Image: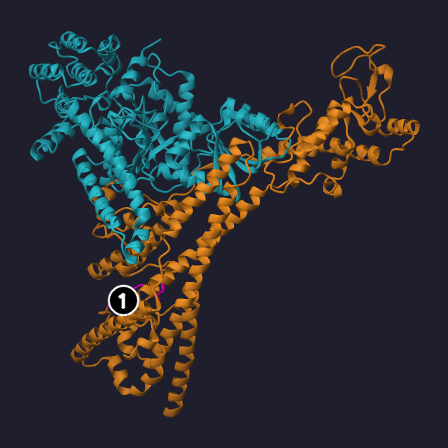
């Protein structure tokens, strides 16, 4: 009856704080034989096993497969669906849901590769061109001789200037060059433009392009690290609207101002085309390095939410187990997780508050972004904080555990009574034979329950009955209920009778059973159970060896 | 075959592909509706999508490079142009582009040439180009498709795109049947088939089982369904108040509180609505009462918070409580308004007569007498009177005793605008017997089938006089899934043959569907678990929007 990794409570009591995940799948629990809607996995299993026990067992397996699939569908692809609980007794609920098969993502077609192929072949040309310009710019900025004449020769050589007589009109604006309209050479590509169409690059601009990562950041005015606006190099043509906001705009301003400044030695004359190419590159490189504070805060926020989400199911499991009076978990351990969980949620609250309180930017969308982050976090907190169940106090826990012990005792007594009755009825029962023939065996066995995951026998310390009654595997005629899912969320598969040779020594049979159970436990990743089983197995084997020796 | 889930899965996939980080969702006018009918804002906020922008508001959007942009738009010319501009002057850090339908390669090329800063990370087609109202219901929000009873090329194209996207989203490549009497149905069927042939790689869905079937119908075949008053919750709200993209405006309701001016009815986030949208009016009253009681016990429990245990209980139950209280105030307001209108307009009386007109139990003289009585009732609205007159004209279209003049006069006296008075003739042209294949009123030749059905109904007795009418679609689909639908009236396109009974069925009604039909298909699905039927329309009509459709249908 394995339901790997999914925890399903068997007692209605536990479903209180936890109902949504289960309730939502109710739509799907329809008995395939009599078409009755059973509401939950457990009910369906019970119903099936009691009412259709005589039917093929393989059908049961199929059914289980289906049920598991339904759960998978309801939870994995669309986690949000589990949030809508549907009241189970409501006829209307069944009314509006029709169960259809699993659905996969619809058809899709990707153009990404084609898009990138076209884009990249185009960008390669631009990139090569820009790189060439940057190399020249680097040389102009750093290697040019300071002597004006030498410098002119250096510039001419570097970009191979176009001959003056080839260009009668400005290629940019189409004006004819005349006496008072001088020709200017772009220092980067060598083309000729008129004075109106030429541009100047500031040293700072050149520096930032040729040395994008380096120390250039240091001499710049330190911007407050929390500045929400990104450094955005606006284009020259863009007006004063954004000037005040970012430092890189200031650098653009320095270019603009340099146009009118007399000190042209400090700048590099260029044409519009080259300037655009360079600005584009600068924008790209700068974008790559700037990161706003909001991003960091949001990243931490997302991390906290994820952490708390991963802690939450485990904590829920613990509290439920504790509320049941089980002793699978320790109270302090649970309390510690609770504290961690609460601390994470506090952090979520604090971070989102911090985001909402960042200095205003004057950008309404940015403000909207922050307030949406905050409200989403608040929503999350509301839904989580109230959904974290409290832990029982130490005294309450003791009481709960006491109560559970009594319940278990009662159940064992009841079981034993029925067992006794059955024993009386069947004259030759292998198991009673084993129990009576070798009573000494019960001593070592008693310490290790055969099936520590079974509901009744979950706690070794509560066991005072012999294994025969507790271990459902030992019911050869299958009259007692098969193992149900335990509160620890894992139970071994029922063993097939064919796994055993009827003539084997009962002890050997037991060893085989434990081996199989151990395999299953390992597969299901139940480390604790597996460890105790393997301990149990070695002891059994030792015992068997001794017995064989004795017989010899 | 869950149309709604299909859209949600597409949206989830988009959000997942962009990875962690703050995101903005960039949409156009139509995709905004696609997303908003299946996702609530708070749900999508939880997925780190914090901003929602319109692509056509380009100039107003601000530079925010720290956001990832998920762009979900229709592949229209304007959108491609807007995206080109966006890529040249990007406002966001990176772009994940999803077109809601098939986009030409040339457009991709144009876009690629604009992406000089290499900001586009993904560019794909996700076929969520329809509005998923329920798991089995979709529409395209295109009213007024008739233009002199034919398609305008752009509309035909748009409808074909929307319909085929629903097929793609559910991965179905159906055989196509269409209503033989409708040239428009034929043309639409032809276009869908052309697309499937052209994009055969895309429509290559291997599946076992019988081939799905797409049945294309024309609203003109059944003008009755959109004219009737409705008594199931969803249909009633749409009829009396109007549902627009899951939103219902209550601004006209007397004494409505400010936060109730507009409410959202979503099957996804509203449990009560999802559970009760197909309940009839009486059942809703019961459910509302239950909800109220649940709320009151909770409220009482919360009223006394004295001990620590009370406090604890309060905290534990609070979110649920809050949810309930929201649902209570919304649905109580809605149902209250519905019952107010029912009483104020004497809707029960109107509806009873409507149903009897349609069921064909009454002869002409009786009808005339009852109609006089109802129309002259001052409580009955002009619109309801108009419905009756229209139904009367349809019902007795070929009856020599038909007297539309008297009723037109009565309507005029009731204050109906001139436009409305012309609708009787327009309706006959739109959906009169000359066009129809089927006998909507079981009045003339009674087929063996229909006869048996009526007989059976007679024996069982009429359960509810207000909901006797079953829309024609229910009959047609029933025949279709039993493989009994006449090929002469509803032929397969390209002469395809069907030997098996189909399991997956799409019904598409050009000219608009109704919530009554959505309900009927829901009932069919519930009754036959072996077949799955989805229904769609160019829009979802109530009487008002349908009259608008008729009015525009033969305008030049």
For label 1, the crowd category at 10 Å Cα-Cα, with few meaning under 14, some 14 to 19 and many 20 or more, is: some
Considering the image in quadrants, where does the C terminus of chain A appear?
bottom left
Task: State the image quarter where residue A251 is shown.
Answer: top right
Q: Nearer the viewer, residue B484 or A235?
A: A235
In the rendered structure, does residue A491 fall within the stretch colored magenta?
A: yes
- Residue A223 image point, x, y percent: 66, 39
Q: Specify the subunit that label 1 lies on.
A: A
What shade does chain A have?
Answer: orange
Residue at position x 88%, y 28% in the image: A157
- Residue B98 image point, x, y percent: 50, 33
Question: Does any portion of residue B452 appear in the rendered image?
Answer: yes
**Label 1 belongs to which residue?**
A482
The secondary structure type at the circle numbered 1 is loop
Residue at position x 30%, y 65% in the image: A324
Residue at position x 74%, y 17% in the image: A172
Left or right of A531, for residue B470: left
| Residue projecting furthest to the front | B306
- Residue A182 image point, x, y percent: 83, 15
Vertical arrangement, residue B90 with respect to residue A218, above or below:
above
Question: Does any portion of residue B171 appear in the rendered image?
Answer: no
Considering the image in quadrants, where does the N terminus of chain A appear?
bottom left
- Residue B244 image point, x, y percent: 33, 27
Q: Majority secondary structure of the magenta segment?
A: loop
Vertical arrangement, residue B93 with respect to residue A84, above or below:
above
Q: Nearer the viewer, residue A117 or A209?
A: A209
Q: Nearer the viewer, residue B419 or B396?
A: B419
Task: State the image quarter where residue B148 is shown.
Answer: top left
Q: Which chain is cyan?
A: B
Q: Which residues are magenta?
A: A481-492
In the rendered structure, does residue A30 fall within the stretch colored magenta?
A: no
Vertical arrangement, residue A550 with respect to residue A212, above or below:
below
């Amino acid at each position: 009856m394995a339901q790997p990794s999914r925890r399903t409570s068997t007692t209605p009591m536990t479903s209180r704080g936890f109902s949504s995940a289960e309730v939502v799948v109710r739509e799907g629990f329809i008995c395939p034989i009599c078409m009755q809607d059973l509401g939950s996995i457990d009910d369906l299993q019970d119903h099936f096993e009691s009412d259709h026990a005589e039917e093929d067992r393989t059908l049961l397996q199929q059914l289980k497969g289906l049920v598991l699939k339904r759960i998978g569908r309801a939870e994995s692809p669309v986690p949000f669906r589990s949030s809508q609980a549907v009241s189970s007794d409501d006829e209307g609920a069944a009314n509006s849901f029709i169960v259809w098969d699993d659905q996969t993502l619809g058809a899709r077609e990707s153009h990404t590769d084609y898009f990138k192929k076209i884009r990249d072949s185009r960008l390669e040309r631009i990139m090569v061109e820009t790189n060439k310009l940057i190399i020249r710019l680097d040389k102009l900025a750093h290697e040019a001789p300071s002597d004006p004449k030498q410098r002119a020769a250096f510039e001419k050589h570097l970009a191979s200037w176009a001959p003056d007589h080839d260009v009668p009109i400005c290629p940019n604006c189409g004006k004819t060059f005349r006496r008072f309209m001088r020709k200017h050479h772009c220092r980067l590509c060598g083309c000729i433009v008129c004075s109106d169409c030429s541009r100047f690059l500031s040293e700072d601009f050149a520096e930032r392009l040729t040395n994008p990562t380096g120390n250039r950041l240091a001499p710049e005015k330190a911007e407050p690290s929390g500045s929400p606006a990104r450094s955005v190099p606006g284009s020259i043509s863009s007006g004063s609207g954004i000037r005040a906001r970012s430092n890189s705009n200031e650098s653009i301003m320095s270019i603009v101002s340099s146009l009118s400044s007399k000190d042209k030695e400090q700048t590099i004359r260029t044409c519009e085309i080259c300037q655009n190419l360079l600005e584009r590159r600068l924008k790209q490189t700068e974008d790559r390095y700037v990161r706003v504070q909001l991003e960091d805060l949001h990243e931490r926020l997302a991390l906290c939410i994820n952490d708390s989400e991963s802690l939450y199911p485990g904590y829920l499991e613990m509290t439920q187990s504790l509320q049941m009076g089980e002793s699978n978990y320790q109270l302090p351990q649970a309390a510690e997780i609770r504290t961690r969980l609460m601390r994470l949620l506090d952090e979520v609250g604090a971070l989102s508050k911090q985001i909402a309180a960042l200095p205003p930017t004057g950008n309404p969308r940015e403000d909207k972004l922050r307030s949406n982050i905050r409200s989403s976090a608040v929503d999350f907190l509301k839904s989580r904080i109230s959904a974290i169940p409290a832990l029982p106090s130490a005294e309450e826990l003791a009481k709960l555990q006491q109560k559970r012990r009594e319940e278990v005792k009662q159940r064992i007594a009841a079981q034993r009574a029925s067992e006794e009755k059955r024993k009386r009825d069947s004259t030759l029962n292998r198991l009673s034979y084993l129990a009576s023939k070798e009573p000494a065996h019960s001593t070592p066995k008693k310490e290790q329950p055969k099936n520590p995951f079974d509901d009744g026998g979950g706690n070794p310390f509560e066991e005072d009955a012999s294994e025969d009654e507790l271990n459902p595997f030992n019911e050869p005629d299958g009259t007692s209920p098969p193992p149900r899912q335990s509160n620890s969320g894992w139970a071994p598969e029922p063993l097939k009778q064919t796994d055993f040779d009827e003539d084997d020594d009962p002890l050997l049979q037991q060893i085989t059973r434990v081996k199989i159970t151990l395999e299953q436990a390992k597969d299901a990743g139940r480390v604790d159970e597996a460890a105790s089983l393997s301990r149990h197995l070695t002891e059994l084997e030792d015992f068997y060896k001794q017995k064989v020796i004795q017989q010899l | 075959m869950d149309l709604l889930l299909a859209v949600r899965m597409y949206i989830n996939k988009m959000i997942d592909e962009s990875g962690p980080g703050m995101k903005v969702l960039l949409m156009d006018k139509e995709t905004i509706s696609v997303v908003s009918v299946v996702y609530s804002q708070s749900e999508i906020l939880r997925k780190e999508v914090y901003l929602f922008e319109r692509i056509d508001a380009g100039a107003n959007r601000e530079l925010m490079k720290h956001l990832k942009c998920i762009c979900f738009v229709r592949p229209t010319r304007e959108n491609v142009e807007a995206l080109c501009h966006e890529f040249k002057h990007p406002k966001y850090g990176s772009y994940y582009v999803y077109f809601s339908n098939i986009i030409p390669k040339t457009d991709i090329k144009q876009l690629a040439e604009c992406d000089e800063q290499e900001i586009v990370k993904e560019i794909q087609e996700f076929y969520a180009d329809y509005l998923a109202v329920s798991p089995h219901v979709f529409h395209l929000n295109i009213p007024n498709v008739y233009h002199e009873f034919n398609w305008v090329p752009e509309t035909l194209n748009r409808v074909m795109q929307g319909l085929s996207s629903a097929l793609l989203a559910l991965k179905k490549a159906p055989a196509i049947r269409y209503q033989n009497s409708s040239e428009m149905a034929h043309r639409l069927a032809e276009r869908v088939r052309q697309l499937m042939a052209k994009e055969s790689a895309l429509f290559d869905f291997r599946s076992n089982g019988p081939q799905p079937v797409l049945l294309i119908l024309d609203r003109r075949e059944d003008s009755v369904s959109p004219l009737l008053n409705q008594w199931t919750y969803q249909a009633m709200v749409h009829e009396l108040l109007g549902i627009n993209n899951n939103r219902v405006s209550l601004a006209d309701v007397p004494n409505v509180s400010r936060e109730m001016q507009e409410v959202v009815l979503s099957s996804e986030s509203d449990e009560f609505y999802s559970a009760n949208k197909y309940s009839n009016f009486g059942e809703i009253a019961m459910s509302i009462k239950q909800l109220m009681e649940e709320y009151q016990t909770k409220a009482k429990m919360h009223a006394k918070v004295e001990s620590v245990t009370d406090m604890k209980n309060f905290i534990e139950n609070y979110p649920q409580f809050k949810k309930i209280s929201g649902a209570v105030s919304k649905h109580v307001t809605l149902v209250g308004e519905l019952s107010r209108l029912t009483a104020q307009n004497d809707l029960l009386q109107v509806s009873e007569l409507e149903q009897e007109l349609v069921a064909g139990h009454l002869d002409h003289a009786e009808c005339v007498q009852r109609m006089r009585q109802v129309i002259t009732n001052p409580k009955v609205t002009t619109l309801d009177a108009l419905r009756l007159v229209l139904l009367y004209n349809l019902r007795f279209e070929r009856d020599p005793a038909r007297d539309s003049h008297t009723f037109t006069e009565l309507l005029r006296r009731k204050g109906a605008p001139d436009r409305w008075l012309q609708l009787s003739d327009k309706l006959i042209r739109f959906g009169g017997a000359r066009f129809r294949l089927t006998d909507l009123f079981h009045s003339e030749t009674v087929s063996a089938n229909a006869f048996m059905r009526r007989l059976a109904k007679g024996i069982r007795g009429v359960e509810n006089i207000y909901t006797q009418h079953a829309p024609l679609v229910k009959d047609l689909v029933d025949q279709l899934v039993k493989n009994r639908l006449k090929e002469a009236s509803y032929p397969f396109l390209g002469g395809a043959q069907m030997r098996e009974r189909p399991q997956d069925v799409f019904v598409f009604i050009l000219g608009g569907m109704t919530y009554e039909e959505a309900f009927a298909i829901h009932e069919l699905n519930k009754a036959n678990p072996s077949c799955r039927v989805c229904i769609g329309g160019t829009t979802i009509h109530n009487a008002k929007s349908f009259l608008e459709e008729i009015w525009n249908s033969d305008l030049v």
